């Protein structure tokens, strides 16, 4: 049986204020959950994203200021995370993890990052807990290195992927698709190649129908040769920052069906966890684990064919 490649590092959960709204400890708890609940994975440890790659996509002055701790306090407040050397190190490491996950997906067909999905980061600024945009960096890296020519970013985080849309708007080799709660953050949305709005309180049945119909349409019309799937768990009914009402079973069915359709067409796919928020860090980690469990099941199916 093929084992699902997963990418993670202990550095994903640096020292961080326990009272902060962002649950930094969830990355550590997610790895523990996967080790306990998901069989047949193989662990890969990331290396920090090279500065030349990072600065080929993001503004060099912004990158240098953030990494050196000299970014304007107003810009730090917009990001929403307290700067520290540990956070600066963690950010490049996790960005490198998304890039590596995409490379592993090219090799294995499917790979999962136990982090990533920082879709609110723009070219020269961060926002909404996002510092650098791993989706934009990874997609452009895949194309620049000849690993792919048509990359679909299929974003099912509950928040619209404004940064990704802005950064890739003029890139002919990418297609950005965001399915999100219409009335949630960000207040000012940036048009993706395709945006699909969901009303507050949307439940499993209508949500799954909307997600899968959208995916089927984009796969048929745009014909990507690689998919980055942002499997945000913040659509869950118990998420602290979501506005939808998707159950745990609905979340699993979404991820399973999305991956089944992508891999059913033999398209390589990298998954990232996207957003998920809860005062109970272990609870939100378990919801993030659903995409890994679904990916491992799809991986097992393909190896038995």
Image: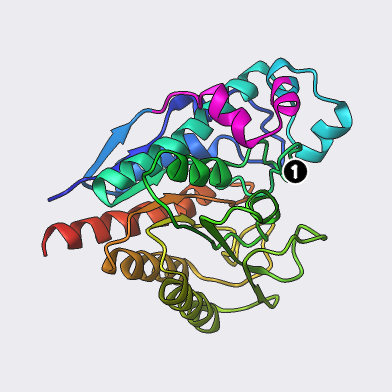
For the C terminus, the quadrant is: bottom left
Expressed as whole percent of the image width and height from the top left, the position of residue 281 reads 56, 43
Q: Is residue 298 above or below residue 102?
A: below
Query: In the image, is 120 to the left or to the right of 230?
Result: right
Q: Going 56% across and 24% down the picture, which residue do you hit?
A: 52
Expressed as whole percent of the image width and height from the top left, the position of residue 268 reads 33, 55
Callout count: 1
Q: Quadrant of residue 296?
A: bottom left
Between residue 89 and residue 145, name the one nearer to us: 145
Q: Quadrant of residue 44?
A: top left
Q: Going 51% across and 27% down the picture, which residue do you hit?
A: 49
Residue at the right extreme, as displayed: 74
In the image, residue 59 lies in the stretch drawn in magenta: yes
Between residue 50 and residue 83, name the one nearer to us: 50
- Which secondary structure class fits the magenta region best? helix
Q: Is residue 214 above or below residue 121?
A: below
Residue holding disc 1: 127
Query: In the image, is 45 to the left or to the right of 187?
Result: left
Please provide the residue range marked out in magenta.
Answer: 46-64
Q: Is residue 104 visible?
A: yes
In the image, residue 37 lies in the stretch drawn in magenta: no
Expressed as whole percent of the image width and height from the top left, the position of residue 134 reads 55, 41
Q: Quadrant of residue 178?
A: bottom right
Judging from the image, the colouring scheme is rainbow
Q: Going 64% across and 47% down the picture, which residue do you hit?
A: 279
Expressed as whole percent of the image width and height from the top left, the position of residue 36 reads 31, 43
Query: In the image, is 144 to the left or to the right of 125?
Result: left
């Amino acid at each position: 049986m093929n084992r699902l490649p997963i990418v993670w590092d202990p550095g994903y959960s640096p020292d961080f204020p326990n009272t902060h709204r962002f649950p930094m400890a969830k990355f550590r708890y997610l790895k523990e959950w996967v080790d306990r609940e998901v069989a047949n994975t193989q662990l890969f440890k990331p290396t920090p994203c090279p500065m030349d790659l990072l600065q080929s996509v993001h503004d060099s002055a912004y990158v240098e200021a953030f990494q050196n701790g000299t970014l304007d306090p107003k810009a730090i407040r917009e990001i929403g995370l307290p700067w520290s050397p540990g956070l600066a190190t963690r950010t490049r490491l996790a960005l490198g993890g998304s890039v590596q996950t995409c490379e592993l997906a090219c090799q294995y067909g499917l790979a999962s990052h136990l982090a990533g999905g920082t879709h609110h980061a723009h070219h020269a600024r961060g926002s909404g807990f996002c510092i650098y945009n791993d989706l934009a960096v990874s997609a452009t890296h895949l194309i620049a290195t000849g690993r792919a020519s048509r990359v679909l970013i299929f974003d099912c985080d509950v928040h619209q992927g404004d940064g990704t849309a802005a950064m890739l708007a003029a890139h002919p080799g990418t297609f950005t698709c965001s399915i999100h709660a219409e009335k949630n953050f960000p207040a000012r949305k940036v048009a993706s190649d395709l945006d699909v709005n969901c009303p507050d309180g949307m439940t499993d049945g209508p949500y799954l129908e909307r997600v899968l119909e959208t995916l089927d349409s984009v796969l048929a019309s745009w014909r990507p040769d690689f998919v980055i799937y942002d499997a945000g768990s913040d659509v869950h009914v118990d998420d602290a920052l979501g506005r939808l009402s998707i159950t745990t079973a609905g979340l699993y069915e979404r991820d399973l069906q999305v991956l089944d359709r992508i891999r059913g067409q033999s398209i390589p796919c990298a998954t990232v966890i996207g957003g998920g928020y809860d005062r109970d860090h272990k609870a939100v980690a378990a919801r993030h684990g659903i995409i890994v469990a679904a990916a491992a099941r799809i991986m097992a199916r393909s190896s038995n064919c």
